[in-house]
Amino acid sequence: MLKDVHAFEAGLDPHPANYVPLSPVSFLNRAASAFAEKIAVIDGPRSYTYAQLLDRCVRLASALAALGVGRLDTVAIIASNIPEMIEAHFAVPMLGAVLNPLNTRLDAANIAFSLAHGGAKVLIVDGDYAPLVRQALEQVDHEIVVIDIDASESSAAPLGPRNYEALLTGADPAFPWPGIADEWQSLCLLYTSGTTGDPKGVVYSHRGAYLSALGNGFSFGLGFDSIYLWTLPMFHCSGWSYPWAVVAAGGTQVCLRKVEPAAIFRLIAHHRVTHLCGAPIVLNMLAHAPADQRVPFDHTVTVATGGAAPPSAVFRSMEALGFRVTHLYGATETYGPATSSVFLPEWNALPADERFAKMARQGVAYPMVEAVTVTDPKTMIPVPRDGTTVGEIMVRSNTVMKGYLKNEPATAKTLVGNWCLSGDLAVWHPDGAIEIKDRSKDIIISGGENISSLEVEEVLTQHPAVMLAAVVARPDPTWGETPCAFLELKPGATQPDDKEVIAFCRARMARFKVPKTLVYGPLPKTSTGKIQKFMLREQAGSL
């Protein structure tokens, strides 16, 4: 005998009218219907309305289907921040296939690994990267269908007979693309920039991408009038979901192939750009750009930055130039940003240094993130919100990855209990904001005392000659470890005397935290602008 069914469940099952699988593709349908003639994408002399963008995406989906791409097949793309990258972020999921944006700054061996590990069936290639891809394809055992995008600068020969624009011209503009039936279905494959061993393939779902895009758009204040400039690589966490977020808001995306301060300032002034994202290295480039590269503009540009918090000097410089900076925190495993430093009105009354210090914190959970905690990784008990007790940042959200492709052991080490473990050490402040102190592997233990490399770097970047600082542990026979500082100087700056820099630090921090060794020169960086500390640790160990 069947149990009685509660009135709130009887006859109230999900229906196609009220239960639709979440997918970011729906944002483009709505924008093309509501704002058909509005400019959606600008790339130099090229521009596309929302109606044209939808048409191009449907045609690309049609062309890919004709090449045999179907549900859960992998379509890789290697390209700069160009319209074709945006189009791939909609056309591939239209088929229920998986998009694999490749890091343009990797070497051929790493590109080959990603293509082989991800099982790419089709590879879309920006002609500027044809020589690199040619080398990579020689190292891949399975056959991959290549589609060439015409190069902007390179004169390299196409890799194959299939041209992107020609395929779109011959494709079906009324193609009945299948979409998805399950929002948990895989949508994107993003490879982490591994420091040791092979990179890990992070898998995103349609549901996660949809919610991540809305969370980013809401937190960043995107709206119909937003003009978003692509200074963040679209291959990095699918551009933090902004290819979808800007479309959800009905805004305009301005493409930028190379991150150059002169081009950024020019585009901001010409298009009245309202929003851009980038790693702290991008902010450094803008803050220290020569005067002849700075085109004036008379509006405020909202900037989101992730990675290590920019030093207070960068906040100060960016504010003076007309930028309002919001600091974010996240990882590839969390679709990019998971927290943001929400600016509170009372901060305006604080002295500048205190205000910048609060702005540099990693802040609070995004609206679409269920929970962020700072927890003792041994006991899994949250640390006190006292601003001093150190724990590990952990995230629980619909915007946490499904897992690592073909790597269950690594997935099990990252998704533990109810949480996604970050490996980042932080404190939790009484107002609920988190503040990173270091990566767990970057804490320096000197004579039994813990030293935050970020704290030392903050002081070093206040020195008038220093643009970037990276501090790592150097083995020491007496103290176990001591801080070793690698310093990249501002353009045109004269290298300071070591004693003067050390005295500068001693006046601003405890003596045991002061670097014992200083090394000057360009810092090694990943493709997303993060400083490669593992290389510096190796160098420090041999000094």
Image (cartoon, helix red, strand yellow):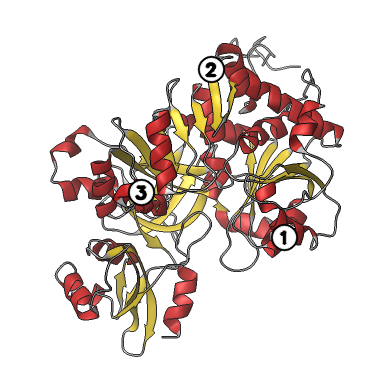
> Residue at 84% across / 60% down in the picture?
141
Q: Amino acid at mark 1?
A: Phe
- Whole-percent x, y for residue 67 in the image: 85, 36
Write down the residue under mark 2: 38
The total number of labels drawn is 3
Residue 484 sits above or below residue 236 on the image? below
Sequence order check, earlier mark of 1 and 2:
2
What label does residue 286 carry, if any?
Answer: 3
Sequence order check, earlier mark of 3 and 2:
2
Q: Is residue 490 left or right of residue 402?
A: left
Quarter placement of the N terminus: top right
Q: Nearer the viewer, residue 349 or 319?
A: 319
Residue 109 sits above or below residue 290 on the image? below
Write down the residue under mark 1: 113
Q: Quadrant of residue 47?
A: top right
> Residue at 31% across / 34% down in the picture?
297
Q: Amino acid at mark 3?
A: Leu
Sequence order check, earlier mark of 3 and 1:
1
SS label for mark 1: helix
SS label for mark 3: helix
Q: Amino acid at mark 2?
A: Lys
- Whole-percent x, y for residue 432 in the image: 30, 42
Residue 512 sits above or below residue 421 on the image? below
Q: Nearer the viewer, residue 474 or 10?
A: 474
Quarter placement of the C terminus: bottom left
Q: Nearer the viewer, mark 1 or mark 2?
A: 2
